[in-house]
Image (tube, rainbow, N blue to C red):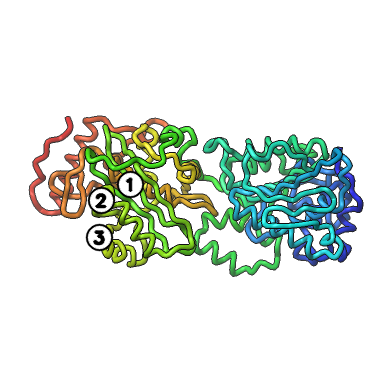
Amino acid sequence: MALIKRTSMRDALSDPKLLGNAIPGDSWRVWRILLIAALGEALTDEERAIYQSFTGRQAEPGFQLDEFYGVAGRRSGKTRAAGVAAAFVGCLCKHDYLASGERATIPVMAASQVQANKAFEAVLGVLEDSPVLSRQIDTSNSEMIRLKTRVDISVRPANFRTIRGITSPLAIGDETAFWHNDETSANSDTDILNAVRPSLATSGGLLWVISSPWAKRGELWNAFKSHHGDKGEPEILVAKGASREFNATLPERVIKQAYSRDPFRAVAEYGGNFLDGISALLTAETVDRAIDADVIERPFDERFKYVAFTDPSGGSSDSYTLAIAHAEDGVAVVDLLAETKPPFNPETVTKQYAEICKRYGVTAVAGDNYAAEWPKSAWRKNGVEYRRSTRTASEIFDNAVPLFTGDKIAIPDNPTAAKQLTALERRTSRGGKSLIGHPPGGHDDLAVSACGAALLACPVKIGKDFKLAGPLFPTANGFSTSPNGHAAPRADELFVRYNAMGNRRELTRQEKDDDWREFDRREAEAAKRPPVRRTYFG
């Protein structure tokens, strides 16, 4: 079963009254070829050669596809092309499969409302640029375009629970590489696409998935691995290419600047290639275990000593967040998570957060190593000291992992924090450098405050590469792992052991003793003094 077209995609793309002005010229040629082929129409010999270079297939299918996956770098025009597909299906296909009084839905799904809105705007722009198709718009608002053809084009965040129960001739998934996957979420990309596929069955509709590539996991990667080239199922097509292969008008300097700033990321975002070395930091199950269901905020309890961590923001793009925590029976208990989303006045938010700290008896707050100086003065003005964290956000997340895996952390029931924690990724470059953070387009403001406060309450790591081998001792500058007040060792060879599989493992008591003795020996040698007398763990 396939959609019944009132005209061909090729004719529509060549007619200025229909879609001829939507993606015109040589720079859009690749997308026009893919749209024509996806709708089951024939290609010319010249077009077929281009089709082969992107799909790895010798010839177009000759029938309408069930599923199309466009794996393309950023600024490649993939969202605009998806808008053309939506306009064509919504206005230039028949919808006789609908029952009396029923309306069809074309969902435009993305990881966030903001991303979905951008894709939605592309659809609206295509319709409004057409003298004929624009007259098919009955009403429109920020969430839905209601067409006179009994089709609604709706924007929505990707969620398998809310996508069910519709009849759809086309479903668009935007930037699916950055949706959650089975490893990290109960609302995974697999769940969402499996939920939407039955809605396409009645209409003979098409699933249209577009995304820049990222990690080698998830539905986009699985589709590429299974269906790119002649080895794949004929009804499922995967096209893949770099940004400038799809869009030759993209300036070369933009690509060069991206590779200069972050070559690891640019390989995916502009090179159009999936990346090795990316893995989820925490599973959804691990994060779920840490959440105290229905606990929004814990009140002050005089039995405990509280600590606070904040992630400041200037108020224009990122959220300003705060977390309060305490230690209880060896567990880092996060009592409160506060988030202020932009836009806001940072001075006003700092004052509000300082009052929260005072409620919990907190006189000093640790904060992200923010580049600007204003957080320190703003907090001091409100009676709370601001101390920059010695750890980067990546180190904070890395150090907090044992709290989660060891069930030594309890956080409030905050959906945003849970989402950010499950989305965290560990990225390892070819040089072996590891970095932990949010995926492209994501945020980790609440996550870093929660983990930062938890580590202040129950420290489990010092530095980048090893677990804390002993208790903390107060010093003038904070805390140390040795009574002589020196910082914990940072040498890679100390406090690190590997098993036969090459994975990090726990140290034995004897190994901890040996490493602390060696650390003290090195300190003494550097300071040209005798080693400190210490009671070791053995």
Towards the viewer: 209 or 117:
117
For marks 2 and 1, the one nearer the N-term is 1
Q: Quadrant of residue 533?
A: top left
Towards the viewer: 259 or 94:
94
Quadrant where the C terminus is found in the figure: top left
User: What is the number of the mark on residue 362?
Assistant: 2
Depth check, mark 1 against mark 3: the one in front is 3
Residue type for callout 3: Gly
In the rendered image, residue 181, in percent from the top left (x then y), is placed at 57, 39
User: What is the number of the mark on residue 383?
Assistant: 3
Q: Quadrant of residue 97?
A: top right
Within 10 angstroms of label 1, few (less than 14), some, or many (20 or more) residues? many
Residue type for callout 1: Ile
Q: Secondary structure at mark 3?
A: loop
Q: Compute the Cα span from label 1 to label 3.
A: 17 Å
Q: Quadrant of residue 66?
A: top right
Q: Compute the Cα span from label 2 to label 3.
A: 10 Å
Q: Pointers 2 and 1 in contact (CB under 8 A)?
A: yes
Q: Is residue 74 above or below residue 327?
A: below
Q: Give the tally of numbered discs.
A: 3
Q: Pointers 2 and 3 in contact (CB under 8 A)?
A: no
Q: Secondary structure at mark 2?
A: loop
In the rendered image, which residue does mark 1 sit on? Answer: 324
Judge from the rendering whether residue 128 lies leftward or rightward of residue 317; answer left or right: right
Judge from the rendering whether residue 45 lies leftward or rightward of residue 376; answer left or right: right
Q: Secondary structure at mark 1?
A: strand
Q: Compute the Cα span from label 2 to label 1.
A: 9 Å
In the rendered image, residue 191, in percent from the top left (x then y), is placed at 63, 36
